[in-house]
């Protein structure tokens, strides 16, 4: 597995901190690999280190609860700062209390676990602010290409736009086996991480809502629009329930919502938001007959790439016109329009015309999958094949 330096670098600053280090993110995004990479780095300068993987039944049988965990660490550690790694820690009864205790016993604690128990809301409640969390995401293209190369494979940009960046998916050679893997992952996220976690009784309603949301990536959604869609499908659902269910999808890191910023009202429009899937595979596995939603998946992929670069994203709306992204990092701000292609004249006029109300002091960018460079004197065109290798937009 590749070394994901983008995530490793900020974690290193906390290696010796007494805060509990939480490696979090959607299932199968590579959390355990990151945890192992940290372990091997620290192992190069100390042997006062303990790693426990509670996915191993033998380990869980020997250490089923808080008392056994604390006893095991006490009997295997040395006197100085001890580094303790606990993978799939949620399987241990009283795990949060054990982590808090280890923290005050001169241990640097690193934990990771499945989202069915270890959600962002769970951190706040169980660890009472005594932690720092690091969110891991599925691969962006440069990571996917590097891992594919390690496996002696190649991955195209089109393949990435359809099937996204869950790391293990690159190991499957046929579409049939790939779909089996991704469908099983999807079912685990929906059933284990959300339905069972929150004891949702209206399981069919939730599954249909999740399908609708995953298929609506890169679109403006509101609870009201989802309510109308659900009612039209014969599954009426209250606005309160819809809002709650969307929150569950976000807490499982399955989707991310981006606020629509109104320049006219000078505020965020909380009741309108644009939804992006954590990985576009969550859209593609729901599509029949290979009619993949390349247009919206492409925008979703660009969003994921920009977030990986460290940009804070909002949707621009001036009351009449919308621009896909306003991307901010430090003192730099970019207005970005995303389109799969602007080769057709109407598409070119629409995407480049989106900036017509902005003055030339704004940095304006159009990102497309075209090979031709369509840059003008005031608008920069970035080809997707170039974007995926960039570290900054400037």
Image (cartoon, rainbow, N blue to C red):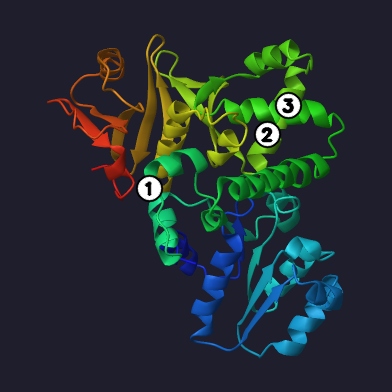
Q: Residues within 10 Å of mark 2 (few under 14, many from 20)?
A: some
Q: Residues within 10 Å of mark 1 (few under 14, many from 20)?
A: some
- Residue shown at the point (69%, 87%) measured from the top left: 77
Where does the image place residue 7, in percent across and percent down from the top left?
Answer: 47, 60
C-alpha gap between disc 3 and disc 2 = 15 Å
- Give the labeled residue for mark 1: 309
Q: Is residue 116 left or right of residue 359?
A: right
- Residue shown at the point (78%, 82%) measured from the top left: 72
Q: Is residue 158 left or right of residue 27?
A: left
Is tag 3's residue or tag 2's residue first in the polypeptide sequence? 3
Q: Nearer the viewer, mark 3 or mark 2?
A: 3
Quarter assignment of residue 74 = bottom right
- Give the labeled residue for mark 2: 247
C-alpha gap between disc 3 and disc 1 = 33 Å
Is tag 2's residue or tag 1's residue first in the polypeptide sequence? 2
Q: Residue furthest left?
A: 377
C-alpha gap between disc 2 and disc 1 = 25 Å
Can residue 96 be seen? no
Quarter assignment of residue 319 = top left
| Element carrying mark 3 | helix
Q: Is residue 144 left or right of residue 134?
A: left
- Residue shown at the point (78%, 65%) measured from the top left: 95
Where does the image place residue 390, in percent across and percent down from the top left?
Answer: 29, 48
- Give the labeled residue for mark 3: 208
């Amino acid at each position: 597995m590749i070394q994901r330096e983008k995530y490793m670098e900020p974690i290193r600053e906390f290696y010796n901190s007494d805060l509990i280090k939480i490696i979090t993110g959607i299932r199968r995004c590579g959390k355990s690999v990151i945890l192992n990479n940290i372990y091997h780095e620290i192992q190069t300068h100390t042997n006062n280190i303990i790693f426990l993987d509670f996915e191993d039944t033998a380990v869980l049988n020997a250490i089923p609860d808080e008392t056994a965990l604390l006893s095991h660490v006490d009997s295997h550690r040395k006197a100085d700062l001890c580094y303790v790694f606990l993978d799939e820690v949620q399987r241990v009864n009283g795990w949060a209390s054990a982590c808090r205790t280890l923290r005050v016993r001169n241990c640097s604690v690193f934990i990771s676990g499945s989202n069915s128990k270890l959600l962002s809301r769970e951190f706040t409640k169980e660890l009472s602010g005594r932690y720092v969390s690091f969110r891991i995401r599925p691969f962006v293209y440069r990571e996917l290409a590097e891992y594919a190369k390690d496996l002696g494979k190649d991955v195209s940009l089109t393949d990435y736009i359809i099937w996204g960046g869950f790391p293990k998916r690159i190991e499957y050679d046929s579409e049939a086996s790939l779909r089996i893997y991704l469908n099983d992952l999807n079912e685990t996220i929906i059933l284990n991480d959300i339905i069972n976690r929150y004891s949702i009784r209206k399981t069919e309603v939730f599954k249909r809502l999740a399908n609708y949301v995953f298929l609506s990536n890169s679109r403006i959604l509101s609870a009201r629009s989802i309510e109308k869609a659900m009612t039209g499908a014969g599954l009426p659902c209250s606005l309160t329930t819809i809002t709650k269910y969307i929150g569950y999808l976000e807490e499982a890191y399955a989707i991310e919502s981006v606020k629509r910023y109104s320049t006219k009202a000078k505020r965020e429009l909380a009741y309108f938001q644009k939804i992006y899937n954590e990985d576009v595979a969550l859209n593609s596995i729901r599509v029949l007959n290979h009619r993949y939603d390349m247009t919206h998946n492409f925008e979703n992929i660009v969003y994921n790439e920009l977030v990986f670069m460290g940009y804070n994203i909002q949707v621009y709306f001036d009351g009449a016109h919308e621009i896909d992204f306003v991307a901010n990092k430090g003192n730099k701000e970019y207005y970005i329009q995303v389109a799969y292609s602007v080769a057709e004249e109407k598409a070119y006029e629409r995407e480049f015309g989106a900036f017509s109300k902005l003055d030339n002091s704004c940095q304006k960018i159009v990102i497309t999958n075209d090979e031709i460079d369509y840059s003008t004197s005031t608008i920069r065109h970035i080809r997707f094949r170039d974007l995926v290798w960039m570290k900054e937009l400037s």
